[in-house]
Image (spheres, grey):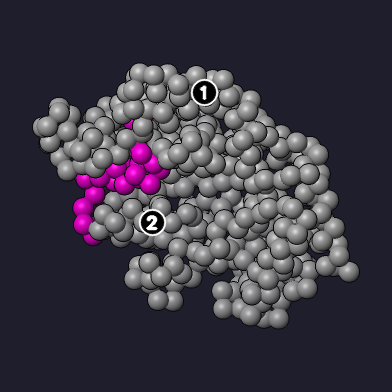
Amino acid sequence: MKIQMVDLKGQYEKIASEVNNGIQEVITNTQFIKGPQIKKFEEALATELNVKHVIACANGTDALQIAMMALDLKLGDEVILPVFTYVATAEVIALLGLIPIMVDVDADTFCIDVNLIETKISVRTKAIVPVHLFGQCANMDEIMRIADKHNLFVIEDTAQAIGAKYEINYELGIMNYEVNYELGIMNYEEEEKMSSKANSIQNSKLISAGAIGHIGTTSFFPSKNLGCYGDGGALMTNDDELAKKIRTICNHGQSVQYVHDVIGVNSRLDTIQAAVLNAKLPHLRSYEAARNEAATWYDELLGNHPNIIIPKRNPKSSHVFHQYTVRIRNYELGIMNDELGVVNDELRVKSEEELYIAPNSSLISDTSNFRDELRRKLSEKGIPTMVYYPIELHKQKAFEKYHVAGEEFPVSERLVQTVLSLPMHTEMSREMVEFICSNLLALLEHKQA
């Protein structure tokens, strides 16, 4: 049985005629840049996400950079982001001369720990970038409340969570400004109320990931839930002026040809990639359903094993399972006994599900070796796995200067040693999942013996 982390060929074969016809149309018309397929895709995605504006660009990294340029962030401004994420989120902050301020993540969702954000806010803080990691949303209620309180921008990194929905809950009585969201599925206007809690109004609506903050960004890298056959990205916003500025920045800072109002970049989705995305977008919901079905099978087969922590779901967010990431516990370290408060005096944190080893503990390398040995043995049986991510941002050489001496991120420092992503894609079958799980469980039982 052939197992792949991502099966783009199998997915393509089911929609080959749609993709081929779309690509051929572009080639026939020879409008490879700024062809009509791009506008068609932007409008279709805006409808799918119930957001007013979608602006396509060259890739997801560009989308993050352009978002920060559009918000006029200045040299030395600070931007808060999770420490456990892909490098692109921090990379663009540094490239623009901004200061990445890293925050640890929640152990259950892998998203930024909202309880720690305010401890990192200073007079120079200008924005928060929540990353909706692995397919579900961060705690956007609290992030928006904090952003409102401190007058900060919110840029959602939705590269891994396109199509996810979040049940937003605003208590409008405590907001400091007039709320005016017109999201198609959420349309209300409430002026600031007096401080009396009795006058506060609470609204609960399902909003698409990327449509909650000031700007959302996403990537269409081929392996993404909605991927093209090259590079691609997009920005989303409900602000008309921001949308206009973003579109201008994407096009060398010009809104009229050869008239450059601002410093911009050359970042555009090419027409062939738009044609591919137009063919795939109508299938996004079925792709999401297929991923969730595979996740349910994994849950069923792995959920009761004491050495595997299956993905936790944020009850306020749907999960589109860009990745199915478990955490592996090591039998030999004595960390399985949840009744223990310490293990060899080396534990720093005890959570509901897992005991976290202090970052300088000698046990960490043992745990990582245990996980990596499982990976090697699974590979020998034809089962690929990945580790997202093996190194936290603050330990990357490129970001050493942004790390405050002595600052620790205990959850992330534990996650890099224990996370394991199993194959997840739209073409997963029950037979594949059973093969993967039976081999993983057999290896764990053998290790225990």
Query: Identity of the amino acid at label 1?
Result: Asn
Percent position of residue 165, x then y = 53, 32
Q: Quadrant of the C terminus?
A: bottom right
Q: Which mark is residue 90?
A: 2
| Front disc: 2 or 1 | 1
How many other residues sit within 10 Å of disc 1, few (<14), some (14-19) or many (≥20)?
some
The residue lying at 55 percent from left, 36 percent from top is 225
Residue lying at 17% horizontally and 43% vertically, measured from the top left: 263
The reply to whether residue 145 is in sight is no
Badge 1 is on which residue?
A: 20
SS state under label 2: helix
Residue type of the residue flagged with mark 2 = Ala
Which stretch is magenta? 49-78
Q: Relative to residue 420, is residue 93 drawn left or right? A: left
Q: In front: 438, or 123?
A: 438
> Which sits in the foreground, 200 or 48?
48
* The stretch drawn in magenta includes residue 311: no
Image vertical order of residue 216 relative to residue 380, above or below? above
Between 62 and 211, the one lying in front of the other is 62
Which x, y percent locates residue 7? 63, 39
Q: Residue at x 41, y 70 (%)?
A: 397
Element marked by disc 1: helix
The residue shown at (42%, 18%) is: 25
Indicate the quadrant containing the N terminus: top left, top right, bottom left or bottom right: top right
